[in-house]
Every structure is written in structure tokens, then in C-alpha cells.
């Protein structure tokens, strides 16, 4: 398996606090069958703004242990979307995912920001495709999942956290994740791991849950998409809006604690 979103680099953001933690995360990932990891430290204007050189240096600190465990590491970033993101991309400050044409971006948790359309358009003008990290945790998307459709229609992709499917972030987030998956609005499954204790780098249980929710073909497609990303191949979307009938059924099932 391939994990395209993992905060495993030591001492660079709110992920692995030190080398020992990072190495233990590698061991957990290897035992779960993860063979390739894109390291994605936060890039934010206020708290975190690692340079490409700093990320490369941190990666080299744990690469020997990763190789012993049969894991290949790649550089990346999780970029907090701001009006300045296109400029930072153009000026070479941002790591795409494993050097591909895909850039992992994060929205504020409260809403899709009003500048998102414009900023995403400017990113795509540079030949880069945004991958929205954990949309199921965004308050605006939880309230109205169909607000993602216009972005997906433009070629934007999304990545769901395995923990969201397993209920680790609460009922609302879990329900939203399932709805997005069922309607083809998710393209990647990742751990978004931050430590060796909580939010660990595990995917296999989430893959099983994904099969249960949307079928084996969907699970296989999401896993294959991660390989396509590493190969810098084109990834297509087969999303569809959530109909009023589907929304009403989901609401009813939630009331009787099915979700």
C-alpha cells in the first residue's frame, strides 16, 4: 500500500516529535503492509513554513531505517490554502506530492474559504492539480457535501482519512466520509498519521471498511490512484451529486444509529 499523506518527518510540524517516534511510525506502517510513504509536513503561513531543503534533510535522517523496513519515502507537503499559495508555488517554495503534478492542499476546518475557487484556478493554470486533504472534516462540506462538486468538475481531487471512515473523528465526520466515498467524490485513502500512539500510519483496517462501504472495486480504485499519483499519471473522477433522496435516507439511518 501507498500512503500519500503522513506527518512522519521528525521535529518539523505537529507530527513525529523526534527520530525515535518517526522510526516507530515506520515500523507500524511496515507491519501494516505500507511500502511507500509521501512525507507531508504542514506548510502554513503562521506556524509552519519548512523549506524544501529542510524537508529533504529530515527525510534523510529516517531514510536508512525506512529502507531496512522496505519502505520508500518521498517528499511532499500539506499546504494550507491561502491567497498566496499560487505565488508560493510559482516561486518554488512548495513540494508537490513526490515531485508529481499533484499538490496536497488543506482548507480551514470551518468552511471552504471564499477565495478557494480563484486560488485553485491559479494553481491549475500552473499545470498543478490540487488534492484536497480530508474534506470530510470540513464544516462546510459536512453541512453540504455537494459544494465539492463544482471543484471536482474542474479536475480537483480529494483524499479521505482512514480514521474518518473508522469513526475516529466522530459521527458527523464519519458519515460525511461515507457519503463522499459512495458518490465517487474521494480519490485517495491515506492515514494522515501524526504519531506512534494516536493517529498512527495504518491503512489496512480502513481499506476493509472502504470495501464494506463502497465495494471492493472502489477500494481497489483508490489504492490504484495512489500508484498513479506516484507515476504522475492522469487520475479521473466519476463523482455524482448526492440526491435529495439519498440525503434523506442517510439522515434517517443516522437517527437510528446506523452511521
Image (cartoon, rainbow, N blue to C red):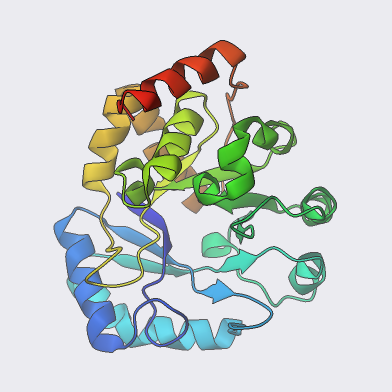
| Residue 157 picture quarter | top right
Lateral position of residue 132 relative to residue 64, left or right: right
Q: Residue furthest front?
A: 255
Q: At x 66% / y 82%, what residue is drawn?
A: 46
Count the marks.
0
Lateral position of residue 105 relative to residue 208, left or right: right
Lateral position of residue 83 relative to residue 192, left or right: right
| Residue 100 picture quarter | bottom right
Q: Which is more toward the observer, 138 or 77?
A: 138
| x, y percent for residue 92 | 73, 75
The image shows residue 81, relative to residue 234, as above or below, that is: below
The image shows residue 142, relative to residue 217, as above or below, that is: below
Residue 94, visible in the rendered structure: yes
Q: Which is more toward the observer, 249 or 237?
A: 249
Q: Which is more toward the observer, 112 or 30?
A: 112
| Residue 123 picture quarter | bottom right
The image shows residue 52, relative to residue 131, as above or below, that is: below
Lateral position of residue 91 relative to residue 223, left or right: right
Q: At x 57% / y 63%, what residue is drawn?
A: 99
Q: At x 35% / y 31%, what residue is drawn?
A: 220
Q: At x 39% / y 79%, what residue is drawn?
A: 9
| x, y percent for residue 42 | 54, 73
Residue 67, visible in the rendered structure: no
| x, y percent for residue 101 | 64, 54
| x, y percent for residue 1 | 29, 49
Q: Residue furthest top?
A: 245
Q: Quadrant of the image for the C terminus?
A: top left
Amino acid at each position: 500500500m501507498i500512503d500519500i499523506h503522513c506527518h512522519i518527518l521528525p521535529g518539523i510540524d505537529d507530527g513525529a516529535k523526534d527520530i525515535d517516534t518517526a522510526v516507530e511510525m515506520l515500523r507500524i506502517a511496515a507491519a501494516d503492509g505500507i511500502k511507500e510513504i509521501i512525507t507531508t509536513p504542514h506548510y502554513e503561513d503562521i506556524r509552519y513554513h519548512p523549506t524544501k531543503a529542510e524537508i529533504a534533510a529530515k527525510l534523510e535522517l529516517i531514510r536508512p531505517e525506512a529502507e531496512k523496513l522496505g519502505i520508500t519515502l518521498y517528499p511532499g507537503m500539506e499546504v494550507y490554502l491561502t491567497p498566496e499559495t499560487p505565488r508560493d508555488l510559482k516561486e518554488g517554495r512548495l513540494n508537490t506530492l513526490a515531485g508529481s503534478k499533484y499538490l496536497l492542499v488543506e482548507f480551514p476546518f470551518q468552511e471552504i474559504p471564499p477565495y478557494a475557487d480563484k486560488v485553485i484556478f491559479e494553481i491549475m493554470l500552473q499545470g498543478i492539480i490540487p488534492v484536497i486533504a480530508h474534506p470530510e472534516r470540513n464544516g462546510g462540506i459536512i453541512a453540504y457535501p455537494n459544494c465539492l462538486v463544482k471543484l471536482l468538475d474542474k479536475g480537483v481531487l480529494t483524499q479521505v482519512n482512514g480514521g474518518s471512515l473508522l469513526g475516529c473523528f466522530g459521527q458527523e465526520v464519519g458519515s460525511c466520509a461515507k457519503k463522499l466515498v459512495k458518490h465517487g467524490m474521494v480519490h485517495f485513502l491515506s492515514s494522515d498519521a501524526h504519531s506512534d500512539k494516536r493517529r498512527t500510519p495504518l491503512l489496512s483496517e480502513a481499506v476493509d471498511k472502504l470495501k464494506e462501504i463502497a465495494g471492493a472495486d472502489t477500494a481497489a480504485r483508490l489504492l490504484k490512484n495512489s500508484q498513479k499519483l506516484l507515476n504522475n499519471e492522469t487520475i479521473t473522477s466519476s463523482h455524482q451529486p448526492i440526491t435529495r433522496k439519498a440525503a434523506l435516507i442517510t439522515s434517517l439511518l443516522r437517527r437510528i444509529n446506523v452511521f
